[in-house]
Amino acid sequence: MVVVVNRQSRRTSHDLERVHSLLRAHGVQVAAFHVAADHDELRRHVKRAAKAGAPAILVGGGDGSMAHAVDALAHRRSVLGALPLGTGNSFVRSLGFDPHDLEAAVAAVARGTVGRIDLGRVNGTYFANFATIGLSSEIAAATPTSVKSWSGPLAYALAAVRPLFAHKAFRARIRWRGGRLDLRTEDIIVANGRFFGSTPVTADASLVDGRLALFTTNDPTRIGALRTYIAFGLHRQATLRGAHAVSAAKFEIRTRAQQWISVDGSLLEKTPARFRVAREALRVYLPEHGVAHG
């Protein structure tokens, strides 16, 4: 197997030696071990290993690392092993792992339970967990990796202050089969996985249901944006006034002013956006009673 770890991820410096020892303890044979300096280098290592026919590629990092990895592994034979070393680790949570249990992730690789999961795709980029348009994208861009390394999830709250006051609400038209929304909003979330942070985007969101889950509100005020973030933290976003939660296989989103699209925390695309589900596009190691088997 090939292992690629993101040096910038929050837990890498603390757990790098532990990754080595856990792989040895579980009898996982490693052909190459790379510590990438950033997301771009991580992606290059993953893509090179997949093209060379590596049967499994273990990626250590957070959701941003997983986003770059799955974009390189979509529709390939290589199996992804997700090692949680990041801040939120929403993707591994969606797979059914404890997001902080590194040993369980390595044990799953050793056990060899492999399943296929869906990926989302926005314009030309595949994503594992979620993409955001609007304020969340600006917060992701404003959150330094160095701050996440010492403050964890608090980093996003600290980084949100300036975008919260500087960001302007935008007009969006969202279309899906059988429906349409025209609204003015601060934020749009489109999830392939189950979680946005530690909160399910919708009650039935899943990595294997062939659908994306979209959440937004028609409250364009800064207070409304703050209220949405608090509601997600309390798992009560569905009770917000003006909330819209929709599940569909495809979404078309156009905005009057062009907006950045953050893919699992990295600014990778811009509106207009064409979202699609890529069914069973990724092979991945799962916990014993994980999200999908096969």
Image (cartoon, grey):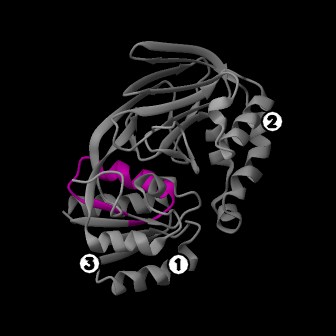
Q: Is residue 273 magenta?
A: no
Disc 2 and disc 3: Cα gap in Å? 49 Å
- The answer to which of 160 and 227 lies nearer the viewer is 227
Residue numbers of the magenta segment: 59-81
For the residue pair 100 and 45, the one nearer the viewer reads as 100
- How far apart marks 1 and 3 lie (CA) works out to 20 Å
Q: Residue at x 62, y 21 (%)?
A: 257
Disc with the residue nearer the chain's start (2 vs 1): 1
Quarter of the view holding residue 146: bottom right
Which quadrant of the rendered structure holds the N terminus? bottom left
> Element under label 1?
helix
Residue 1 visible somewhere in the drawing: no
Q: Identify the residue position indicated by label 1 in the image.
A: 15
Residue 181 falls left or right of residue 206: right
Mark closest to the chain's N terminus, 1 or 3: 1
Rendering coords of residue 202 (x, y %): 52, 36
Q: Residue at x 66, y 23 (%)?
A: 185
Q: Position of residue 140 (x, y in %)?
A: 63, 47
Residue occupied by mark 2: 165
The residue positioned 51% from the left and 27% from the top of the image is 271
Q: Nearer the viewer, residue 215 or 167?
A: 215
Marks 2 and 1, Cα distance to the nearest angstrom?
Answer: 37 Å
Assess disc 1: are there few (<14), some (14-19) or many (≥20) residues with their C-alpha within 10 Å of its C-alpha. some
Q: Where residue 103 appears, x then y in whole percent?
A: 44, 75
Q: Specify the label residue 1 is tagged with.
A: none
Please say whether residue 250 is visible from this viewpoint: yes
Q: Percent position (x, y) of residue 43?
A: 39, 58
Precedes in sequence: disc 2 or disc 3:
3
Under mark 1, the amino acid is Asp
| Horizontal side of residue 159 vs 134, given as left or right | right
Q: Nearer the viewer, mark 1 or mark 3?
A: 1
Few, some or many residues within 10 Å of mark 3 (<14, 14–19, 20+):
few
